[in-house]
Amino acid sequence: MHNTHITWYIPGKVIYIGWESHITLESASAVSKDVYALMSTAPGKVHVLNDARNVVACPRNVMEIRRNMIHLDHPQLDWLVSLTPPGFVAFLADVVPQMITRTKSRAFTTLELGQTHLRYVDRTLDWNMALDLEKLPQHHPA
């Protein structure tokens, strides 16, 4: 069981992952499987908004992390847009997908910058349908 939020940010187009503060390989694997299943319900290409701004601890073995991130291999995945604090988490979120998969990936420090990127790469997104992230329960580092 994990405490990470997984939901449609823009229905059928953008999945939001709001990571918990402490990520284990087991929780990352469970999240990835859930994201893969949700992505499979979409009619076409899907972007993932990967919010790791609250992460304070995560696995550091890049190859183990990659093996557990099956959603990065989903044929419908288009862009992986990560929101991260500076540092190692940002490195993982931006560099790992690009180095180990053919995933189109960018990392930003704010939601606004991530949204701007998605607006630029996909002009078909209906931003009137975007989820208000303020309505999600907040996670606080333990």
Image (cartoon, helix red, strand yellow):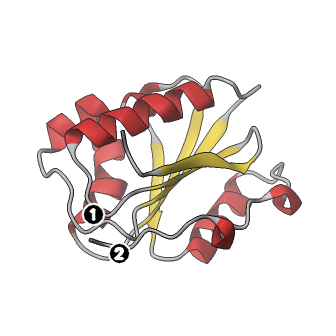
Left or right of 99 in this view: 12: right
The residue lying toward the viewer, choosing from 19 and 50, is: 19
Residue 2: which numbered mark, if any?
A: none
Kindly indicate whether the residue at mark 2 contacts the one at mark 1 (C-beta within 8 angstroms): yes
In percent of width and height, residue 69 lies at 34, 34
Q: Quadrant of residue 135?
A: bottom right
At 45% from the left and 75% from the top, the residue drawn is 109
Point out the image quarter for the C terminus: bottom left
Q: Element type at marker 2?
A: loop
Characterize the local packing of mark 1: few (<14), some (14-19) or many (20 or more) Cα atoms within 10 angstroms. many
On screen, 60 above or below 135?
Answer: above
Q: Residues within 10 Å of mark 2 (few under 14, many from 20)?
A: some
The extreme left residue here reads 61
* Badge count: 2
For label 1, the SS is helix
Q: Amino acid at mark 1?
A: Val
> Which residue does the image show at 22% across and 46% down from the upper left?
24
Amino acid under label 2? Pro
Which residue: 61% across, 64% down?
136
Residue under circle 2? Answer: 85
Percent across and percent down for residue 8 are 68, 46
Residue 134 locus on image (x, y percent): 65, 73
Name the residue tied to disc 1. 89
Res 113 visible: yes
